Amino acid sequence: MKPDIKICGLKTAETIDRALKRGATHIGFIFFEKSPRYIEPDVAGRLADAVRGKAKIVAVTVNPTNDDLDEIVALLRPDIIQLHGDESPERVLTIKAVYGLPVMKAFSVRTSDDLKRVEAYIGIADRFLFDAKPPKGSELPGGNGVSFDWSLLDWLDGSVDYMLSGGLNKDNIADALIITKAPGIDVSSGVESAPGAKSVAMIDEFFDAVEKAYQPETASGS
């Protein structure tokens, strides 16, 4: 079964349209001001009109206050809130209760110990996102174009629903899917021509690579 595919950090109608036409199941808008993919909530809300009913709209936040979320939820009307900071299980529960929306909790991974933090959120977060820990000096919790050791995910059992993120691109997505069998994948910098600038051609190349990974190999000699 093909995974859910989330394209994150989109900022233009053209790239959103291409992602949807190619089969994106989730479109992410980033509300972290230090990110080159940051978008104002009112602009994201207008762009999201083209997404509604075709794919899930994801509001990507980092340690948001209730005031932040009030504005984002009112203007974007997301289907999912993604928390990419150090939000506690209690904070996740509060956000779910206040806004009545499912929460995807992101974790930065470098070692198996990083994944063990997930245990406290099982049954609380609706889905997880596993990204690579940022390189030294980066202020961005995600979108850094680096990967982690995917074999670490062997620790998880099938009950943990997640999206794989971190440095995915057209050249490594097939290996990532073979190694992890991830139920969802998330790509941002891997479809960019420059930080924050999504490329229609690279979106096409990424989806082509995913489709190729799921095509049965032609039998030898046929």
Image: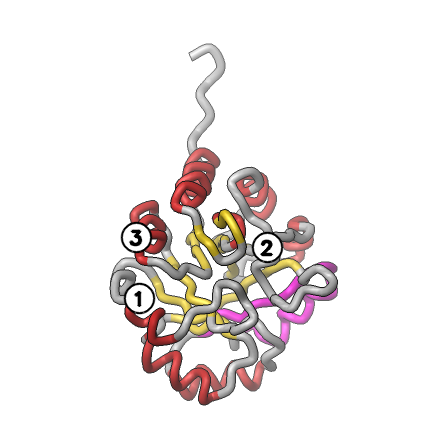
Front residue of 124/142: it is 142
- Please give the name of the residue rendered at 43% of the width and 52% of the height, measured from the top-left corner: 5
Helix, strand or loop at label 3? It is helix
The residue singled out by tag 1 in the image is: 48
Label 1 vs 3, first from the N-terminus: 3
Percent of width and height locating residue 141: 61, 67
Front residue of 101/161: it is 101
Q: Amino acid at mark 1?
A: Ala
Percent of width and height locating residue 63: 56, 80
Q: Is residue 108 magenta?
A: yes
From the image, which quarter does the N terminus lie in?
A: top left
Left or right side of 72 for 54: left
Label 1 vs 2, first from the N-terminus: 1
The residue singled out by tag 2 in the image is: 166
**Residue at the top extreme?**
221
Find the distance from the CA under tag 2 to the CA under tag 3.
Answer: 23 Å
The correct choice, above or below, for 220 with respect to 104 in the image is above
Q: Amino acid at mark 2?
A: Gly
- Please give the name of the residue rendered at 40% of the width and 73% of the height, measured from the top-left corner: 40
- Give the extent of the magenta segment: 103-123
The residue singled out by tag 3 in the image is: 17
Helix, strand or loop at label 1? It is helix
